[in-house]
């Protein structure tokens, strides 16, 4: 049996909390979109999970929590795509955040750039999923403006919330 450290347990607990946060923030405020989806605050939690937990734990939390929200909200046909897209979004944002923060020493710059790239991954990922997997073809492009709006809202909210989490070290005691 492989011994589990306290640090690993704490990281898993944080990931579970962020998965729940992703699901809740996705489900609480849902503004319907014309393309069978909805605009929500889930991207805020996805980016926060990437910045706080790093790419792998943050990606797992973001993908699982966001997929759970789709399953519980009646959008099960989006659940597989959401798992992959939100994982990729958080993983790319998490990798870029840690690299940029080391290079620039400016957390806000690292957040902004990594968040923009992560949101671009989300927009392109959902377009590809709807286009190829759901069979919508080029009609899937109609969802792009709503996803861009969701990305802007999510990034703006995450940029506002992260300093509060980081300043108070709100998650450090877990």
Image (cartoon, rainbow, N blue to C red):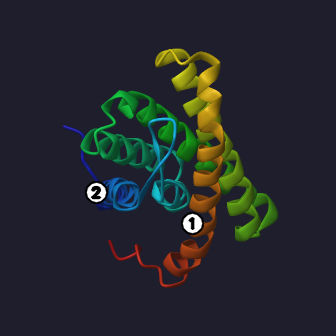
**What residue do we see at 76% from left, 65% from top?**
109
Q: Residue furthest front?
A: 34
Residue under label 2: 9
In the image, 170 versus 47, the foreground residue is 47
Q: Name the mark nearer the viewer: 1 or 2.
A: 1
How packed mark 1 is, by other alpha carbons closer than 10 Å (few <14, some 14-19, many 20 or more), is many
- Up the image or down, 132 lies above or below 2; here it is above
Which residue is the site of mark 1?
158
Image quadrant occupied by the N terminus: top left
| For marks 1 and 2 on the same chain, the one whose residue lies earlier in the sequence | 2
What x and y, as percent, mark residue 5? 29, 55
Residue 9 position in % (x across, y down): 28, 57
Q: Is residue 170 visible?
A: yes
Secondary structure under the numbered disc 1 in the rendered image? helix
In the displayed structure, does residue 131 sit left or right of residue 69? right
The residue nearer to you, when weighing 137 against 100, is 137
Q: Camera-side residue: 151 or 31?
A: 31
Density class for disc 2 (Cα within 10 Å; few <14, some 14-19, many ≥20) is few
Viewed as shown, does residue 72 lie left or right of 115? left
Residue 57 shown left or right of residue 88 in the figure: left
Q: Secondary structure at mark 2?
A: helix
Q: Quadrant of the C terminus?
A: bottom left
State which quadrant residue 8 falls in.
bottom left
The residues tagged by marks 1 and 2 sit, at their Cα atoms, a distance apart of: 25 Å
């Amino acid at each position: 049996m492989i011994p589990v450290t306290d640090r690993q347990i704490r990281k898993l607990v944080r990931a579970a909390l962020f998965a729940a946060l992703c699901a809740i923030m996705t489900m609480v405020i849902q503004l319907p979109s014309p393309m069978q989806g909805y605009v929500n605050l889930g991207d805020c939690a996805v980016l926060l999970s990437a910045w706080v937990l790093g790419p792998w734990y943050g990606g797992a939390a973001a993908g699982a929590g966001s997929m759970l929200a789709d399953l519980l909200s009646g959008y099960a046909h989006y659940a597989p795509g959401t798992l992959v897209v939100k994982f990729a979004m958080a993983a790319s944002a998490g990798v870029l955040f840690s690299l940029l923060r080391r290079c620039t020493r400016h957390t806000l710059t690292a957040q902004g750039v990594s968040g923009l790239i992560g949101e671009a991954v989300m927009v392109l990922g959902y377009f590809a999923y709807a286009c190829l997997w759901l069979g919508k073809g080029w009609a899937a492009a109609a969802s792009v403006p709503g996803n861009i709006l969701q990305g802007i809202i999510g990034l703006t909210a995450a940029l506002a919330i992260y300093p509060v989490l980081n300043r108070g070290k709100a998650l450090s005691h877990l």
